[in-house]
Amino acid sequence: MKKIILTGGGTAGHVTPNIALIPELKKRGYEIYYIGSKEGIEKELIGNFDIPYYGISSGKLRRYFDLKNFTDPFRILNGYREAAKIIKEIQPDVVFSKGGFVTVPVVKAAKAKGVPCVLHESDISPGLANKLCLSSASAICANFPETLSHLPVDKAFLTGSPIRKELFSGDRKEGLKFCGFTEDKPVILVIGGSLGSVRVNEAVREILPELLTNYQIIHLCGKDKVDESLKNTQGYVQFEYIQKELSDLLDAANLVISRAGANAICELLALHKPNILIPLSLEASRGDQILNAQSFEKQGFSCVIREENLTSQGLLEAVDQVYKNKEKYIQAMEDSNQQNAVVAVADIIDKTAK
């Protein structure tokens, strides 16, 4: 039986594509192990699967001053030693890395032990962790066509992002029932991220009466961001966060308003959901969401509103325009070559394994 080590952590976005790969890798006969940080979110997420989990020391390499810059290099070195010991014990045929700083010592240790590595880069421009690992990789998978120009030509493959299988099993009728909605009006799903977005929430609520004339609204507004004054509003439901029922809500949605995190928008692409993207501003990020959104707009998958240009009236006009032209967006997504990423990535892992 072939053995594979999956690694990735720090945020859910560095873990969920690994989770999406697990059923396909098991089907192909892989014995799967996971290396993550000792206390990161990946430990909790992978705990739901019957996979051996190894926690190692990890540190962050920062481009700005922080007292931890003096101690984190020692954590990274310790993580390297721990990863090397685990790799020697497991003797994997291949390592797959989704990114995050915990992956750097794992990939470097695998390279030193002669184990081939496959990386996956979610954003258009590689993050620092993946940049440090490029020279140690045998193959690099990418979400966006633009990313290929940042990668070694002989190692780069456009695959899209592995999507969790359960997202394709949604039931529109169950989603409508869960929300108390009817079939007579289209549904808009608003996703502000797990922490929510104050600006997006405000813009949606400012035009709620106008929206409810023609649409029903599911609003995933983030932790502690439910507006109590809007409870029991006909055709409008709010949730801080949804997990189990998300696939049903996505299937019920005719249009999605979302941030532009790479994994989130790749899920919309895979599900062929017409969408309006409102990427995080440069004040709140390194600009990766803006580049992600621009790529999707260029490919005809999305309508984009920059956060600094967001107005309630502009959002209302965008909603009507995208819904009116929804078939055009759906067709562009159906024609994309960034489909079935789970199989595409698994094929590359198979070819790379020693």
Image: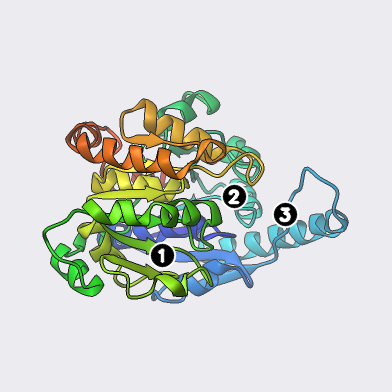
Mark 1 falls on what kind of element? strand
CA gap between label 3 and label 2 equals 15 Å
- Mark 3 burial class by Cα count in 10 Å: few <14, some 14-19, many 20+: some
Give me the residue at 38% from left, 74% from top.
Answer: 231
Residue 348 visible within the image = no
Residue that carries the numbered disc 1 in the rendered image = 32
User: Which tag, 3 or 2, sits closer to the chain's start?
Assistant: 3
User: Which tag, 1 or 2, sits closer to the chain's start?
Assistant: 1
> Is there CB contact under 8 Å for labels 3 and 2?
no
**Residue 203 higher or lower than 9, as above or below:** above
Give me the residue at 26% from left, 63% from top.
Answer: 249
Q: Which of marks 3 and 2 is in front?
A: 3
CA gap between label 1 and label 2 equals 16 Å
Mark 3 falls on what kind of element? loop
- What is the x, y in percent for residue 125? 56, 33
Residue that carries the numbered disc 2 in the rendered image = 107
User: Which tag, 3 or 1, sits closer to the chain's start?
Assistant: 1
Return the mark for residue 60: 3
Residue type at mark 1: give it.
Ile
CA gap between label 3 and label 1 equals 26 Å
- What is the x, y in percent for residue 198? 55, 57
Mark 2 falls on what kind of element? helix
- What is the x, y in percent for residue 341? 31, 44
> Is there CB contact under 8 Å for labels 1 and 2?
no
Tell whether 63 sits left or right of 243: right
| Residue 137 placement: quadrant | top right
Residue type at mark 2: give it.
Val
- What is the x, y in percent for residue 236? 31, 65
Residue type at mark 3: give it.
Lys
Return the mark for residue 324: none
